[in-house]
Structure formats: structure tokens, C-alpha cells
Image: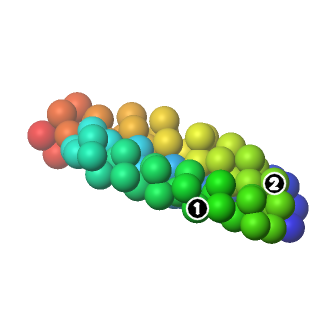
Amino acid sequence: MNRILRMIIHIPHGFIAGIFTPFSCTAGILFSAGFFFYQVLEDWRIKDNSYLDVRGWMIGFPIGYVFGLLLKGGGIFA
């Protein structure tokens, strides 16, 4: 699979984890930990360079976090 496409398809996962975090830190941590645990196991088993997946997640998370902050108290639905 193309490296850029592989990063892009993991951005939504980071985005969703970022949205959860301002509302429930526990949910954000669990969602993120589950993703990282899966990536470590996947790379350990099939050696597929999971850092590309994590890189996509790291792009989506801060975007989702800012969006979650806006949803929570920034005025969009406040």
C-alpha cells in the first residue's frame, strides 16, 4: 500500500480519539492505548512498519482535540 495513503487512512482514528479526550480523558486514553497496543502487536507479528499508521494518528489527534475543545466549551454547542 502507498505510504501516504496508509497514513491518511489512520487520520480519522486519531481525530476520533482527539474528540473524546476533552469530554472524557479516560475514554481518550483508552482509545489511544488500544490503537497503540494494536500497532505494536501488528508490527511485532508481521513487521509492516506500523510507524506509518501512528504518524497518521498523530496528525488526526491534535485536530480532533481542538475540535473537541470547541465542541465542549468553545461555543459551537455551548
**Secondary element at image label 1:** helix
Q: Residue at x 81, y 54 (%)?
A: 49
Residue 5 in view in this figure = no
* Residue 3 in the image, given as x and y percentages of width and height: 84, 55
Q: How many marks?
A: 2
User: Which comes sooner in the sequence, label 1 or label 2?
Assistant: 1
Residue 73 in view in this figure = yes
Residue at image mark 2: 49
* Residue 55 in the image, given as x and y percentages of width and height: 68, 43
Q: Residue at x 51, y 50 (%)?
A: 14
**Where is residue 78, by image quadrant?**
top left
The amino acid type, in three-letter code, at marker 2 is Asn
Residue at image mark 1: 38
Is residue 20 left or right of 49 when viewed as pictured?
Answer: left
The amino acid type, in three-letter code, at marker 1 is Tyr
**How many residues crowd around disc 2 within 10 Å: few (fewer than 14), some, or many (20 or more)?**
some
